Amino acid sequence: MSTCIISEIYGDLFSADETYSMAHCVAADMRLGRGIAIKFRNKFGQIPKLKQQNVKPGGVAVLQDRTRFIYYLVTKTSSWNKPTYQTLETSLRCMKTHMLQNNVDKLAIPRIGCGLDGLEWHRVRNILEEVFKDIVVEIIIYNYGK
């Protein structure tokens, strides 16, 4: 039997233990110029390596940071566009495939797609639960503030 455990906490995503891989949403142009994407750009860099992967909306670009992976869920074409729930779900499924292939069972994320991208958290959480329901994984959602 598989168990997907999703929990929400308040805190800084970047304080997550390094045994947790991380993910966030980006545009295919990889500008990473607003919101939490700036923090990912500053911490992990390697923008040329991300651009070389040439990922289209619905895919995922991946960097390796020592023993963990950093997932860039490509949910829209350009930074000024908005994602759809469909591109988010497709990107999550691509990430799940990579996670299974690489034995990733711990993931730390923000409320993906719900900051500047404007998706509704309850719908995004339902998508997360659906996508990961059949695998063993612990997902911690870091809520900002409080």
Image (tube, rainbow, N blue to C red):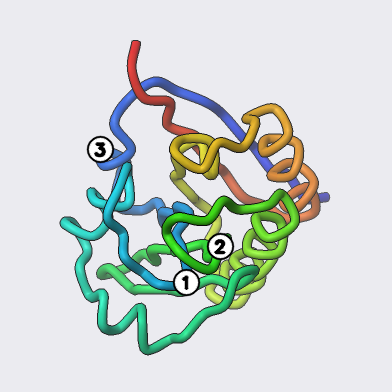
Q: Earlier in the sequence, mark 1 or mark 2?
A: 1
Q: Earlier in the sequence, mark 2 or mark 3?
A: 3
Q: Which mark is residue 71?
A: none
Observer-nearest of 103 and 23: 23
Q: Are marks 2 and 3 in contact (CB under 8 Å)?
A: no
Name the amino acid, label 2: Lys
> Residue at the location (80% across, 46% down)?
130
Observer-nearest of 9 and 81: 81
Is disc 1 placed on a helix, strand or loop? loop
Q: Residue beneath label 1, please?
A: 28
Cα distance, mark 2 to mark 3? 27 Å
Name the amino acid, label 3: Ser
Q: Residues within 10 Å of mark 2 (few under 14, many from 20)?
A: many
> Residue at the location (51% across, 43% down)?
117
Q: Are marks 1 and 2 in contact (CB under 8 Å)?
A: yes
> Residue at the location (43% across, 26% down)?
143
Cα distance, mark 3 to mark 1? 27 Å
Q: Residue furthest left?
A: 42
Q: Residue beneath label 3, please?
A: 15
Is disc 2 placed on a helix, strand or loop? strand
Cα distance, mark 1 to mark 2? 6 Å
x, y percent for residue 112? 52, 43
Q: Residue beneath label 2, please?
A: 76
Is disc 3 placed on a helix, strand or loop? helix
